[in-house]
Image (cartoon, rainbow, N blue to C red):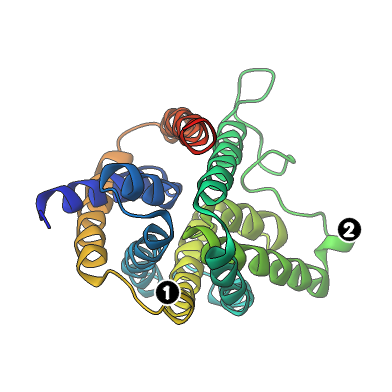
Amino acid sequence: MPTVLPLALGALVGFPLGLTGAGGAILAVPVLVYGLSVPPHDAVGVSLVTVGATAWVGAIDRIRAKEADVKAGLALALAGMASTPLGAWLNTKMPEQWLLGSFAVLMFVVALRMVRGSRPSRDGRAPATGSPDSPDATDSPGSPDSTGTVRLVRLIAMGLAIGVLAGLFGVGGGFLIVPSLVLLAGQPIQTAVATSLTVIALVSTSGVISFIAAHGELNVPLASLFALGSFGGLAIGSRIGRRVSGTWLRKAFAVFVLSASLYIGARAFLG
């Protein structure tokens, strides 16, 4: 197998993750399928290794810097790790056409969420802190959602959903994790991003184990090259991301993901 192409395409996956803080994993499966001609079911396993390894690199750095909320992250991660075997099992039962078609729908939803998350308010300004659309929004102290029990239950429910997605599609679920931590755990967006990496790392690790148990094998050489390339893309994207408007970056990436979802959906159902 050529070495350069998997490294380059892996960097393509890691680059937007470093650039925008989310979304890179959603590209892994289509890049593997259409860029390296990897069968869709095998691509999910390689994607899980890449997502998990890249997230571990970022998570260890954030935990050392004490930027992550480990307790909230563990609530999500433990629930996600419990449900990834279900997603991995569903992956073995779903026909390739429907696997790619469902993945296209997931990408479409991700793109819309990213556009909505970067949209300014009606007066042209970013949503104010504390507003429902603000990344720093939290529940008011008197609301039912402010109780620790309700938030814990919601975090566990979201973790279960994230685990199924990880096992089924090979994604980390960051587009669900970050808003969950902001709205349900009351975390600032910066803390949520750091905590999300920890959750993705743990859930993806569980996903890899579940994938191997369900499929019996994993393309380790390809996964290693792809993950190594992703590390490089992550580093480059992080450097550039500090110098460019985050809102502009997320909008641009959302357009890219939206275009990719339409392409994959057309290929899956129209041939």
* Residue 129, quarter of the rendered image: top right
The quadrant in which the N terminus is found is: bottom left
Q: Position of residue 24 (x, y in %)?
A: 39, 48
Task: Please tell me which residue lies in front, 109 or 249.
Answer: 109
**Side of 202 where 176 appears, left or right:** right
* Left or right of 156, for residue 90: left
Q: Which of the labelled discs sits on residue 238, or is there none? A: none
Residue underneath mark 1: 208
Check contact, mark 2 vs mark 1: CB within 8 A: no
Q: Residue at x 22, y 67 (%)?
A: 224
Decide: is 202 above or below 124: below
x and y, in percent, of residue 231 in the image: 24, 58
Q: Report whether residue 35 is seen.
A: yes
The Cα–Cα distance between marks 2 and 1, rounded to whole angstroms, is 39 Å
On the question of residue 242 being in view, the answer is no
Q: Position of residue 179 (x, y in %)?
A: 63, 52
Q: Amino acid at mark 2?
A: Ser
Is residue 210 shown above or below 258?
Answer: below
Q: Name the foreground residue: 66 vs 55.
A: 55
Residue 229 appears in which quarter of the rendering? bottom left
- How many residues crowd around disc 2 within 10 Å: few (fewer than 14), some, or many (20 or more)? few
Of 11 and 40, which appears nearest the observer?
A: 40
Please state the horizontal and vertical placement of residue 164, each as a whole percent of the image. 61, 66
Amino acid under disc 1: Val
Counting residues from the N terminus, which is met first, the one under dot 2 or under dot 1? Answer: 2
Residue to which mark 2 is pinned: 143
How crowded pointer 1 is (Cα within 10 Å; few <14, some 14-19, many 20+) is rated as: many
In the image, which is nearer the foreground, mark 2 or mark 1? 1
| Nearer the observer, 223 or 231 | 223
